[in-house]
Image (tube, helix red, strand yellow):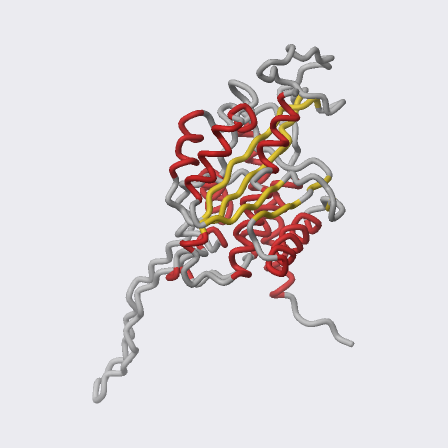
Amino acid sequence: MSVLAGLIVALTLTGAVQSTPSASPQARQGSAQDAVTQVDDVEVTARRLDEQVRSFVNEVATPPYGRNLARWDRKICVGTANIGPRYSQIMIDRVSATAQSLGLEVGEPDCRPDVMIVASADADAVARRMVDENPTGFRPAQSSTDRGSAALRHFQQSDAPVRWWHVSLPVSTDTGDIAVRLTGEEAPVLAVRTASRLRANVRDDLAKVLIIIDANQMGQVSFGALCDYVAMVALAQIDPEADTREFPSILNAFDASSGVTAFTDWDRDYLKGLYTAVRDRATPGQQVRDIVREVVDTSSARQRAAEAPPANN
């Protein structure tokens, strides 16, 4: 069985603004001089939107070392296990709808899942068993396809209510052929076009995502919020240890104090930026700049539309 076939088997099994209030103006009674009003200094502290977006991207984005962020190429197929039929279909539809909003096609009901969502009351045992049964399915190469052995151990031992593992593949921008040597496979031979400081010969595609839901840790999170949370980590390489408390994101769904119960504009803008940005940038930094620019443009356009006066009929 080839490594790619093993991979499929393994994963289908299973401005804040702070101001100091000014003093109330009062006229001096009985004075021959004009009244004097003194207004305290007002301090406004606000982070530029591009700085906020860049901070978010740097916090949540977690591609394999030295690689660009990966995304799905053209099509996605979502599957579930150990979830009742009614709720399973709702989750599949919710994730698929988000994928379609990004321009992806969705597979037919009998398609082989690229995104596998598994619920279990013993998430650790499920994660360990799946990795033990086919380790190369989770790490098909020594580098460039995943976050490494330490991250894989953390995946198996995580105490998070939802855990996930992404596998991505560098592929030829021109042909889509795999551009990294997989374990047990021959090294690929690729035609190299003219080198550029802005564009590379390869891009990074998501290949498989496994998401495990700990059924014992759902707490007060609504099923709708869970679906959107799953969609976010299914469609983007999100760092499981990211601290997103300062951002209005569905990634805070399990923090009751956040008040986030569904996808936010922030989440949608980030995913749109990821799926609109140039995919074969020469460096990760260039790709991040593309994503930040796309997010800022989208957010600014929405703000202008909201502030525009209503059209006269």
Seen from the viewer's position, the closer of residues 37 and 16 is 16
Q: With respect to residue 182, does 114 lie above or below?
A: below
Q: Is residue 100 left or right of residue 9?
A: right
Give the residue drawn at x 50%, y 37%.
Answer: 61
**Left or right relative to 253: residue 228:** right
Q: Which quarter of the figure is the C terminus placed in?
A: bottom right
Q: Residue furthest left?
A: 30
Tell me which residue sits at (68%, 47%) in the image. 102
Establish if 131 lies above or below 312: above
Instruction: List x then y, in percent, for residue 181.
Output: 61, 15
Q: Quadrant of residue 9?
A: top right
**Front residue (pair 194, 110):** 110
Q: Hey, which quadrant is residue 310 in on the image?
A: bottom right
Residue at the right extreme of this rendering: 313
Residue found farthest to the bottom? 30
Query: Which quarter of the picture shows residue 169?
Result: top right
Q: Residue at x 49, y 53 (%)?
A: 249
Q: Residue at x 73, y 38 (%)?
A: 74
For the N terminus, give its image quadrant: top right
- x, y percentage for residue 84? 58, 57
In the picture provided, is 55 more to the left or to the right than 169? Answer: left
Q: Vertical placement of 309 versus 92: above or below?
A: below
Image x and y of residue 57, in percent: 49, 40
Count the labels in the image. Answer: 0
Q: Position of residue 44 (x, y in %)?
A: 37, 57
